[in-house]
């Protein structure tokens, strides 16, 4: 009888623990407004991981909710402010896929370029992102030649080209130090053909690489 009582108590404690865990950590089948408020709450507290989780619940439980549109932009801005630009671009891409219209596509494309540009506080660590962003700027100017955002895009593009020029110089120096002559010559040719070289610009301050961004 004592053993049965102890077993019953243990089972009751286990069931109570599981129920408590579900009630605190796992919430399901809530209205869209609940998840939207949770996103706002977590963004305000600076916990973007939980805000992302709340958005996952909102988007999976309420695929047609009008609150998704605003939630995407809130999260894009929140991640951008925390310098989490890859996540910011993730939300911008999702917003563009679902809600882009002729009246806002220029802004959305500009917003993504700006977010990528802001990621270059450590520009010399990601050559691919640098080149991809240059390509995105050129594509934007070509597609939206009369966009009101073109002056900003052109400014970013100039800084990106300067960064590329300096990065190529660093790559040449590295290849020369390691004895990779042919690789160094490829990048020297790129430097030579750069409009910066042809403009006879003299860049003596190596710290300018980081000041550009």
Image (cartoon, rainbow, N blue to C red):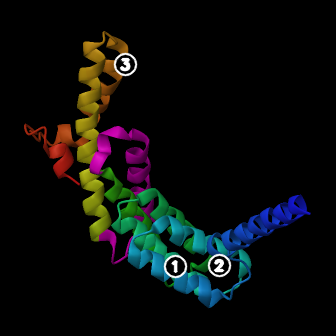
Query: What kind of secondary structure does the magenta stretch mostly adopt?
Result: helix
Q: Is residue 150 above or below residue 157?
A: below
The residues tagged by marks 2 and 3 sit, at their Cα atoms, a distance apart of 50 Å
For the N terminus, the quadrant is: bottom right
- What residue range appears in magenta? 121-150
Determine the secondary structure under disc 1: helix
Question: In the image, 55: left or right of 3?
Answer: left
Foreground of the two, 7 or 144: 7
Identity of the residue drawn at 44% across and 65% down: 112
User: In the rendered image, which quarter is residue 45 located in?
Assistant: bottom left
* Furthest residue in direction front, as rendered: 2
Residue under label 2 = 58
Which residue in the protein does label 3 denote?
Answer: 183
Marked residue nearer the N-terminal end (2 or 3) = 2
Task: Work out whether mark 3 precedes mark 1 in sequence or the reverse, and give the earlier one.
Answer: 1
**Residues at marks 2 and 1, CA–CA distance in whole angstroms:** 9 Å
Label 3 – label 1 distance at C-alpha: 49 Å
Q: Residue 39 bears which disc, if any?
A: 1
> Which residue does the image show at 60% across and 90% down from the upper left?
33
**Number of numbered discs visible in the structure rendering:** 3
Residue 203, x across and y down, in percent: 10, 39
- Up-down relation of residue 169 to residue 21 (above or below): above
Cβ–Cβ under 8 Å for marks 3 and 1: no
Label 1 near label 2: C-beta < 8 Å?
yes
Q: Secondary structure at mark 3?
A: helix
13 falls in the magenta region: no
Label 3 packing within 10 angstroms: few (<14), some (14-19), many (20+): some
Pick the residue in front: 192 or 12: 12
Image x and y of residue 172, in percent? 27, 23
């Amino acid at each position: 009888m004592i053993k049965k009582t102890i077993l019953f108590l243990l089972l009751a404690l286990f069931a109570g623990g599981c129920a408590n865990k579900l009630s605190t950590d796992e919430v399901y089948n809530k209205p869209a407004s609940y998840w939207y408020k949770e996103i706002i709450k977590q963004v305000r507290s600076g916990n973007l991981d939980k805000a992302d989780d709340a958005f996952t619940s909102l988007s999976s439980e309420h695929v047609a909710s009008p609150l998704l549109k605003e939630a995407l932009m809130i999260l894009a801005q929140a991640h951008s402010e925390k310098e989490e630009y890859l996540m910011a671009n993730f939300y911008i891409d999702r917003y563009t896929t679902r809600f882009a219209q002729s009246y806002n596509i220029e802004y959305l494309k500009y917003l993504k370029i700006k977010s990528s540009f802001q990621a270059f506080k450590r520009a010399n660590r990601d050559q691919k992102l640098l080149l991809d962003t240059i390509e995105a700027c050129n594509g934007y100017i070509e597609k939206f030649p009369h966009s009101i955002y073109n002056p900003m895009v052109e400014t970013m593009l100039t800084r990106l080209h300067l960064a590329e020029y300096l990065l190529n110089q660093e790559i040449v120096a590295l290849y020369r130090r390691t004895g990779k002559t042919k690789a160094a010559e490829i990048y020297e040719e790129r430097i030579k053909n750069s409009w910066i070289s042809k403009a006879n610009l003299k860049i003596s301050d190596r710290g300018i690489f980081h000041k550009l961004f």
